[in-house]
Amino acid sequence: MLSTVAYSLAVVLNLFVLFIGGRFLFAPRAAAAGYGVPAEGAGGAYLTVKGLRDGAYGLLGLALLAFVGAEAEAWYMLVVALLPLGDTLIVLRNGGTKAVAFGIHFATAVVVLISAALLFAV
């Protein structure tokens, strides 16, 4: 049961990051607003970079899970949790709301850390 939950959560998180990456590639302004910092004045290249970064992180997580295993994915999740923590600070430093910073980005970091803990327990 624990293994099913651990793997399922990891897959969902990786697919979600892949989706976010796609959104930044295909609807960059809307994705930036959802991120918590509107893209007014920002060049499209920066939004594309974010989309490629997130898409690559999602694919890498899925590949690790499929071809290497739970322990590698757990370490990956542990390191990747730094990204939404950084996103929390970015939103706060750039005029975003605390609700978005903590309710989306910080909460995401917590869920990613839970995923890592579950994968280590498998």
Image (cartoon, rainbow, N blue to C red):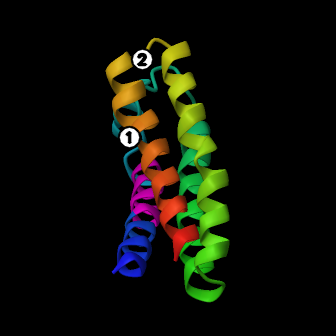
CA distance separating discs 1 and 2:
14 Å
Kind of residue sitting beneath label 1: Ala
Q: Is residue 40 above or below residue 73?
A: above
Q: Which residues are magenta?
A: 13-24
Q: Nearer the viewer, residue 103 or 25?
A: 103
Name the disc covering residue 9, or none.
Answer: none
Task: Check disc 1 and report the residue beneath it.
Answer: 31
Q: Nearer the viewer, mark 1 or mark 2?
A: 2
Question: Which amino acid, by three-letter code, is at mark 2?
Answer: Gly
The residue under label 2 is: 96
Q: Position of residue 104 (x, y in %)?
A: 37, 36
Count of marks overlaid on the render:
2
Quadrant into which the N terminus falls: bottom left
Pointer 1 or 2: first along the chain: 1
Question: In percent of the image, x 62 and y 52: which residue is there?
Answer: 80
Q: Position of residue 121 (x, y in %)?
A: 53, 70
User: Where does residue 109 sit, x and y in percent of width and height?
Assistant: 49, 43
